Image (spheres, rainbow, N blue to C red):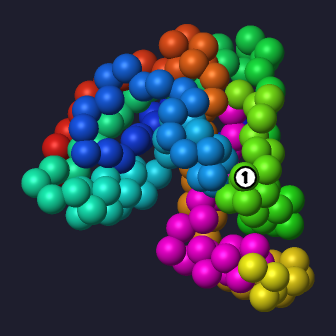
Amino acid sequence: MYIDDHILYHGAVVSVPEPLARVGRSDLDFGPGFYVTNDRNQAIKWANTKAGRKRGLKPVLNIYNFDQERFIADGNYAMKIFPAYNVEWLDFIAYSRKGKQPWKGLDWIEGGIANDGVISTVDAYIDGRMTPEMAMGELVKEDLRHQVCILNQEIIDRYLTFVESIEI
């Protein structure tokens, strides 16, 4: 787990004071869950992207405190953490996007996001146009962009506290 300052962000077009787990498409990077990041700029970028897709809506940065010490101390959650872009991460993303649900049975998944810088590599791998070695040769050039997918509502309810929403 590499959350540094206990603050997590969620970029959206609405205020999200009461987040829900297991919501959303099942073919996302880490499955259907509530996605947050420790990278404020990344959350702002995502909020702007979402607002750009929906005319008339404003980007919103949702801010949360995360009680990491208590979460770790309780330690009774199924977690998967990818500290770097690697073949295991690549396969996980590929399986998820193919509908194989590698996230089933997990409560917390943390790792890199398949953002603009890596999506063409991921797609080429999924389509069979790149071997794992070729894909890793491209991915090592990218900075890891942090994301967490919370798939268990109990984690949200017990450890994530809404601070505020800021219209950007």
Residue 154 location in percent, x, y? Answer: 60, 14
Residue 109 location in percent, x, y? Answer: 70, 40
Give the residue drawn at x 61%, y 75%: 118
Report the front residue among 92 and 142.
92
Report the front residue among 64 and 80.
80
Residue 69, can we see it? no
Instruction: State left or right for residue 3 relative to residue 162.
Output: right
Residue 19 within the magenta-colored segment of the rendering: no
Vertical position of residue 119 compared to residue 152: above or below: below
Give the residue drawn at x 80%, y 29%: 105
Q: Secondary structure at mark 1?
A: loop
The region drawn magenta spans 108-126
Give the residue type that dot 1 points to. Answer: Gly
Vertical position of residue 4 compared to residue 71: above or below: below
Vertical position of residue 121 compared to residue 86: above or below: below
Give the residue drawn at x 40%, y 41%: 10
Name the residue that disc number 1 marks.
99
Count of labels in the image:
1
Give the residue drawn at x 80%, y 15%: 76
Residue 132 location in percent, x, y? Answer: 87, 78
- Rendered image quadrant of residue 4: top right
